[in-house]
Amino acid sequence: MFFILSKIFLFLLNPFNWILVCIVAAFFIKKQLIKKRLLIAAVVLFVIFSNNALYMIAMRKWQPKAVQPSYNRTYSTAILLCGMTKNDSNRISYFSNTSDRFLQTARLYTTGVVKHIFISGGDGSLAQDHPKEAVFLREEFIALGIPDSAIVIESNSKNTYESAVEAKKIIDSIHFEPPFILVTSAVHMPRSVLTFKKAGLDVIPHPAAFDVVNKNWEPEDFVPNIAVLTDWKYLLKEIFGTITYKITGKA
């Protein structure tokens, strides 16, 4: 039930849907004052949530600082959270725009920072009819020359909380030594760290797939950009998801 509600919640957190609701409601409502206010609300929402500068400020406040991490010791394991693939109608998996998670994990292993890779994540779709992502990622790591003996997977979890719980069980059973390097997207890192530590795992954040980095302002950052509307839902999902996890004792 929690998994289904989270999917509905993501739909409701999309500013584009808020604007659409205002416009559709204004079309059907006959009272002119309410119609006018709904249209004004739609315009205001569009101006605010299509502004890339505002989005960048909010994202930089939320995500870890974009820096090049360095390590002076070797760790037993990098925990890689899934959420970086797409699937076609033939059930073939492909990397998506957050696949820097995969690259960063491969780099940690090939440079000798970690000895093992633990991949956590199964099928995050609502219908639960997609290929298991952890299985696909293991095959991709092996294709890069990383030995299968260095890779451990769990492919049952559907969300961050389940990933943390399953990871705790398996890592305890094989006695990997903490602390562990946790790899996920920068926007997802704050909630992930809280959740994994709540589950009893000592993790060091290694954020990847930064959507926003420190840079000088450009004129186009202040011009309305409709693509930014869809970016907000992921940030809002993480903010409200973290609040929900804290309330329910998951983080």
Image (cartoon, rainbow, N blue to C red):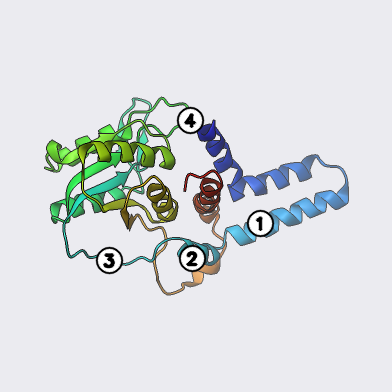
Q: Position of residue 36 (x, y in %)?
A: 81, 53
Foreground: disc 1 or disc 3? 3
The amino acid marked with disc number 4 is: Leu
The earlier-in-sequence mark between 3 and 4 is 3
Res 68 label: 3
Q: Is residue 138 shown to the viewer in this render?
A: yes
Secondary structure category for the residue under label 3: loop
Q: Which residue is mark 1?
A: 45
The amino acid marked with disc number 1 is: Leu
Horizontal placement of 112 versus 120: left or right? Answer: left
Secondary structure category for the residue under label 4: loop
Q: Position of residue 210 (x, y in %)?
A: 37, 58
Q: Which residue is mark 4?
A: 126
The amino acid marked with disc number 3 is: Gln
Whether the residues at callouts 2 and 3 have beta carbons within 8 Å, the answer is: no
CA separation in Å, label 2 and label 4: 30 Å
CA separation in Å, label 1 and label 3: 35 Å
Residue at the location (61% across, 43% down)?
12
Q: Quadrant of residue 125?
A: top left
The earlier-in-sequence mark between 1 and 3 is 1
Secondary structure category for the residue under label 1: helix
Q: Which residue is mark 2?
A: 61
Question: Considering only vertical position in the picture, is 222 above or below 164?
Answer: below
